[in-house]
């Protein structure tokens, strides 16, 4: 199962990339799983585990850690929003 | 009259946006608006410029969803949200919310609701350029509590 | 920035009024406005025209007093009230309230407060011309309760 | 003691005059007294007694029935306001 992952704002800057395509291993089915998978790379990627207020979206809608993923989904991780 | 949201780099004209929203409707009695501006100071540091990043696609969907929630809660006749992105300077306009209705109570409430939810649900992020360098603006807890009170 | 009220026959330009109020101030983050319009229907009858009478002298004093009460309650930086008198037609603007502040909560609250008090304390009276003749508009109980909730 | 009395809106129309100058008899010292004095003329003037929601101002400030008057005061009677 492949998904697209996007990073925004301070997280994008810290990771040095706006996003990537990710092949999910078997058993990696929720947003929380993907977050742990990426953070496990170590280094700056650990920010995904460390950020207390990390927000996430699936297919451009706000999602919860327990939300499940499907092939081709667009996942985004970002800090709390500060518009307006 | 319509319900619409727009993300753009260009400035907006509040009077013209109101006129466009109202059109020829004769049953509107109340128009509430909010506009947010870039302040030259934030948390004690001078702000020279600000860059607004967003999540194209999700932003428009989030704004439309927030407007739909307002329509479900209050009797309103039309609404318009405009949010700027890109580089802005102190005193520049950032965001505009207009709500039109028959009476003022609904128009005020829906306008404030849309702003509170925009502040916590719409994927925009501000980065400020100050004399001490560039920094991403932290989310304010008061914005979370402002959104919570509508539950 | 200033706090002012004006009673006039002429129409007003919302965008121009906001720009004049803000001037060169760079510390304003939030501008809330309300505008009231003449509706083409009221209580089921078509309205052809409306005449707004007021009490010259007291009107300006009442509006200034209402603005002062808002300033005493909320941290706001400027406010402007414009109220038209004379003959108006459906879709004409009647009243404009603008409040500017650092943050949106205060601006929204003060703007709504000023409107609620204007509706019950400022000496304006509306007479409507309908197909059935001319009639003075009755005060709405909902306006009294809207003003009461600020006590 | 002389005062100026003004009438507005539906009340002005019903009375057929925008106002008058009134010499107050001894003992007529409050807004309620003036209201009763005028209503006692009978005819349309009784509207001042009949109107449930009559509002009043002294020197262009909202006033209560018990408010006391001074020579030269400007008193106004009117229906509930309907601007905005």
Image: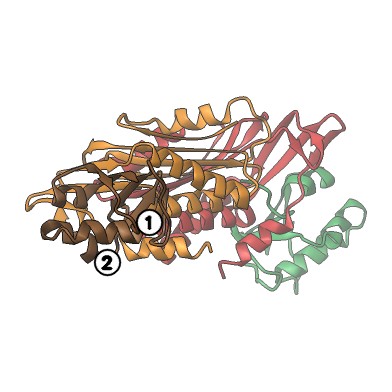
Chain colours: A green, B red, C orange, D brown
Q: Is residue B97 left or right of residue A12?
A: left
| 2 vs 1, front mark | 1
Determine whether D28 is above or below B43 in the image: below
- The answer to which image quadrant residue A74 occupies is bottom right
Determine whether B20 is above or below D41 in the image: above
Q: Is residue C118 left or right of residue B54?
A: left
Q: Nearer the viewer, residue C141 or C89?
A: C141
- Residue at mark 2: D52
Q: Is residue B134 visible?
A: yes
Reading the chain from its start, which is encountered first: label 2 or label 1?
1
- SS category of the residue bearing label 2: loop
* Residue C137: image location, x then y, percent: 23, 54
Residue at the image position 70 percent from the left and 42 percent from the top: B126
Q: Is residue C38 visible?
A: no
In which quadrant is the C terminus of chain B drawn? bottom right
* Residue B33: image location, x then y, percent: 47, 45
Q: Residue furthest front?
A: D26
Q: Which mark is residue D29?
A: 1
């Amino acid at each position: 199962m492949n998904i697209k992952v996007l990073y925004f704002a301070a997280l994008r800057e810290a990771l040095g990339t706006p996003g990537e395509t990710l092949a999910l291993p078997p058993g990696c089915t929720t947003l929380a799983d993907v977050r742990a998978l990426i953070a496990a790379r170590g280094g700056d990627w650990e920010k995904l585990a460390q950020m207390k207020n990390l927000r996430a979206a699936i297919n451009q809608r706000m999602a919860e850690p327990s939300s499940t993923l499907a092939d081709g989904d667009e996942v985004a991780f970002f800090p709390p929003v500060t518009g307006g | 009259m319509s319900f619409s949201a727009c993300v753009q780099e260009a400035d907006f004209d509040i009077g013209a946006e109101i006129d466009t929203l109202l059109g020829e409707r004769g049953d509107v009695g109340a128009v509430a608006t909010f506009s947010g501006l870039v302040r030259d100071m934030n948390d004690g540091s001078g702000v020279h410029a600000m860059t607004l990043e967003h999540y194209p696609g999700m932003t428009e969907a989030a704004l439309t969803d927030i407007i739909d929630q307002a329509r479900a809660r209050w009797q309103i006749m039309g609404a318009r949200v405009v949010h700027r992105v890109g580089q802005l300077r102190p005193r520049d306009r950032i965001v505009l919310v207009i709500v039109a209705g028959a009476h003022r109570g609904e128009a005020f409430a829906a306008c404030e609701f849309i702003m509170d939810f925009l502040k916590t649900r719409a994927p925009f992020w501000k980065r400020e350029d100050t004399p001490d360098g560039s920094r991403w603006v932290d989310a304010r807890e008061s914005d979370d509590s402002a959104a919570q009170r509508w539950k």
